[in-house]
Amino acid sequence: KTVCVVGAGMAGRAAARELRREGHAVTALEQAGDVGGQWLYDPRTDDPLGASPAPVRVHSSMYASLRLISPREAMGFTDFPFLPVAGAGGGGRAPRRFPGHREVLLYLKDFCDAFGLMDAVRLSLNTRVLRVAMAPPQCRAPAVAGGERKWVVRSVRVGERDDTGVQEEVFDAVVVATGHYSQPSVPTIKGMEAWRRRQLHSHSYRLPEPFRDEVLTATHFSISNHLGCMLCRHQPCHQ
């Protein structure tokens, strides 16, 4: 069968490998310029709180100094362990048990190379999926039960207008592997609409330098709570 995998991060690459093992023809659509998903660091930022007039729709929430909070032994696939690369320390590879985000990205690329995912799987980078919908009856192959269910995937090359260069393809199945960290969860806090100074969601944090010598208040709701501790090393901070 033909299967479209939306997203080329950890989940998308793992799904592509398993589907290929079962003999399916796999097409992977990825809006970024490389595989990696959240682990592909992007220095650009969005402003989910609305101060930016033209958000760039940045997918990754990765910041520059991020390191794993779990040991690498707990991060890898069961049949492809996340082990230190021989000669680590040279070539930019990190031998640490709690490495930075770049080492995770390189591990994912090693995974792709080991299982031929960059060649045997059709990978379309810089491609944003606009819509996934059930195909109309005329697109379905004849079958005893009146035609198998198929899916239409509409996509566009990143940088093009959504109404030009749009492509539609029909697949037997679709795997949505877009993750759940790209859309910031912005809380509603009493009085935040009256605050006239800068407000920033952790999705838009990359480097501490812009906050040097400023007094910060960090409100924590999830795994990003260690950002407050990190920023306190550079300036006064209230958590």
Image (cartoon, helix red, strand yellow):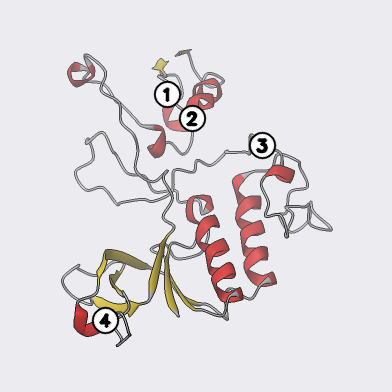
Please give the residue where the numbered disc 3 appears in the rendered image: 70
Q: Amino acid at mark 4?
A: Gly
| C-alpha separation, residue under disc 3 versus residue under disc 4 | 50 Å
Location of residue 13 with respect to 104 vertically, above or below = below
Q: Which residue is mark 4?
A: 146
Mark 2 → mark 1, Cα distance in angstroms: 8 Å
Instruction: Locate residue 125: give its quadrant.
Output: bottom left
Identify the element where label 2 is drawn. helix
Q: In this view of the protein, which residue sits in the foreground, 76 or 108?
A: 76
Residue on which disc 1 sits: 221
Q: Residue furthest right?
A: 87
Query: In the image, is 106 to the left or to the right of 182?
Result: right
SS of the residue under disc 1: loop
Q: State yes or no: discs 1 and 3 in contact (Cβ < 8 Å).
A: no
**Of the pair 79 and 101, the residue shown nearer to us:** 79
- The amino acid type, in three-letter code, at marker 3 is Ser
Residue furthest to the front in view is 144
Marking on residue 224: 2
Mark 2 / mark 3, whichever is N-terminal:
3
Residue at 44% x, 65% y is: 33
Percent coordinates x, y for residue 87 in the rendering: 84, 57
Given the image, on which type of amino acid does mark 2 rest? Ser
Q: Is residue 161 left or right of residue 6?
A: left
Separation of marks 2 and 4 at Cα, in angstroms: 50 Å
Q: Is residue 185 above or below residue 92?
A: above
Q: Nearer the viewer, mark 3 or mark 4?
A: 4
Mark 2 → mark 3, Cα distance in angstroms: 14 Å
The x and y percentages for residue 58 are 36, 50
